[in-house]
Amino acid sequence: MLFQKGQTPQFIEIRRIAYQETYPLRSAILWPTDPSQVPLPTDPDGIHFGLFTSSAASASPISVISLFLEPDSQARFRKFATAAEAQGKGYGSQLLDHMLSEAARQGVKRIWCTARTNQTGFYAKRGMSIVDGTESLQKGVAHIIMEKML
Ligand SMILES: CC(C)(COP(=O)(O)OP(=O)(O)OC[C@H]1O[C@@H](n2cnc3c(N)ncnc32)[C@H](O)[C@@H]1OP(=O)(O)O)[C@@H](O)C(=O)NCCC(=O)NCCS
């Protein structure tokens, strides 16, 4: 249980969710025009987190992120999204921190992601570094690999 900083205390809960619960936000926020990009073949093997607030209209998460453990104490996170109306309020940062703590607790030493290039500033502020400068395109969206040592 967490309480958001601000004038009105708000109940915030971050918990593990089923991968199917990430799909509405993945679809609406990340791939609104390409539903084929929403499910990942590896989803059943991932650890999926959702952030919920007391003011959410339903029992749906308002921010989601998925963690995939890899060999050699590494992990990748994917499909990070906050509902449009909830962005810029600190929810994503709290969810990212929670996921990183959980990864560290599970023995992860290096975590990486393919960041959308318009989000590299967000990740850099949170301790992630660009691995090399090579951009790749995924369905027309530019990405770059970033990493963080835990
Ligand atoms: C990236 C994303 C998941 C971040 O989620 P979020 O909930 O908006 O994240 P936060 O609110 O914690 O942080 C966003 C900004 O708001 C700022 N912020 C944090 N708390 C705040 C508050 N209480 N009031 C106002 N702004 C705040 C943060 O400082 C941050 O700005 P910064 O990067 O300049 O520091 C979200 O923007 C998103 O879904 N984007 C579209 C999909 C996407 O690009 N996903 C990532 C793919 S790699």
Image (cartoon, rainbow, N blue to C red):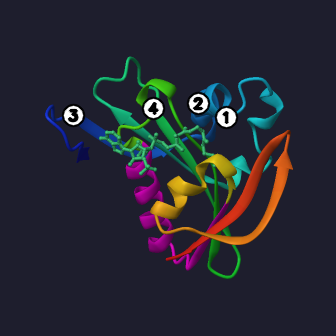
Labels 1 & 3 near each other (Cβ < 8 A): no
The residue positioned 55% from the left and 68% from the top of the image is 128
Q: Position of residue 97 (x, y in %)?
A: 41, 59
Look at mark 1 in the image and give the residue it sits on.
30
Labels 1 & 2 near each other (Cβ < 8 A): yes
- Residue 10: which disc? 3
Look at mark 2 in the image and give the residue it sits on.
25
Q: CA distance from mark 4 to mark 1?
A: 13 Å
Q: Earlier in the sequence, mark 3 or mark 2?
A: 3
For badge 4, the amino acid type reads Ile
Camera-nearest label, 1 or 3? 1
Q: CA distance from mark 3 to mark 2?
A: 21 Å
The residue positioned 63% from the left and 25% from the top of the image is 28
Give, as a single range, the part of the protein colored magenta: 92-113
Q: Is residue 97 magenta?
A: yes
For badge 2, the amino acid type reads Leu
Labels 2 & 4 near each other (Cβ < 8 A): yes
Q: CA distance from mark 2 to mark 4?
A: 8 Å
- Residue 62: which disc? 4
Q: Earlier in the sequence, mark 1 or mark 2?
A: 2
Labels 3 & 4 near each other (Cβ < 8 A): no
